Image (tube, rainbow, N blue to C red):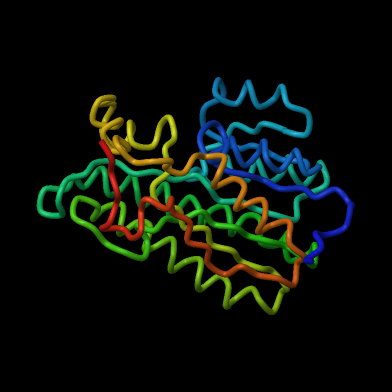
Amino acid sequence: MIQTQSAQPRRALVTGASSGIGAATAHRLTTDGWQVYALARRAEKLEHLAEQEGIIPIVCDVTDAEQVQQALAQVTAEGGIDTLVNNAGGALGVEKVGDGRVEDWDWMYRTNVIGTLTMVQAFLPMLRAHGEGTVLNLTSTAGITAYEGGGGYNAAKFGQHALTGALRLEEAEHNIRVIEVLPGLVHTEEFAAKRLRGDAAAAEAVYRGVEKPLTAEDVAEVIAHAVNLPHHINLDQIVVRPVAQAAQHKLIRKG
């Protein structure tokens, strides 16, 4: 049986932690005794996380280099981290490539790719100095399989996927493990609604008839498993889908 790492307290920073998978991951890690910095743009959404022991909220936009440096200064002053979980991201719009809005594509690229890049560049020296650092990037199955109406999100997630692969190659010599978790269909309270510009009915239709889509807590469980394994074990890529989603193009709906 694989043993988890020592009982010494672990310390992680989770981006996009105000809701969905990020919030679930922050909660899940603290149940394993981790201290977690929960980082997100929306201060009001972080308030409930501050009530849980072991979670330290930080208001920060991952695409803003100055704000990221301020977060780095706080984390450094408080002892640093050994694990960076890049969860911040999102999708906007379902238009075909020919009809795509440049501003939507720009937002998705900045949030998914530049946000990850900015966080990685800021915290790499700390993770290298630790000696057993971990970077976990939450990408998507949209980053390995294109689909109609997903061009902008595909492009952003393919970019983040490529960034992650290059980082793994570059940082192995520094004993940094780089993990990629690629979820398929996950039913969270905000993802589809934001992508569909607040159309609640259309957002709910995304999941209609799907038996047991993944939840934020399901993905958080996978993330926790990956980072709790002994450091020499690197789960390079973890594709996680509900059983009803056999592939990007095959989704079983009932009723």
Q: Residue at x 77, y 48 (%)?
A: 11
Q: Picture quarter containing residue 200? A: top left
Q: Picture quarter containing residue 225? A: bottom right
Q: Indicate whether 244 appears above or below 121.
A: above
Most foreground residue, 137 or 79:
137
Q: Indicate whether 225 appears above or below 216.
A: below
x and y, in percent, of residue 139 in the image: 46, 56
Q: Residue at x 77, y 44 (%)?
A: 32
Most foreground residue, 64 or 96:
96
Most foreground residue, 203 or 14:
203
Q: Indicate whether 136 appears above or below 25.
A: below
Q: Which quadrant would the C terminus be assigned to in this image?
A: top left
Q: Picture quarter containing residue 249? A: bottom left
Q: Which quadrant would the N terminus be assigned to in this image?
A: bottom right
x and y, in percent, of residue 103 in the image: 25, 43
Q: For the image shown, how many numbered marks are present on the structure?
A: 0
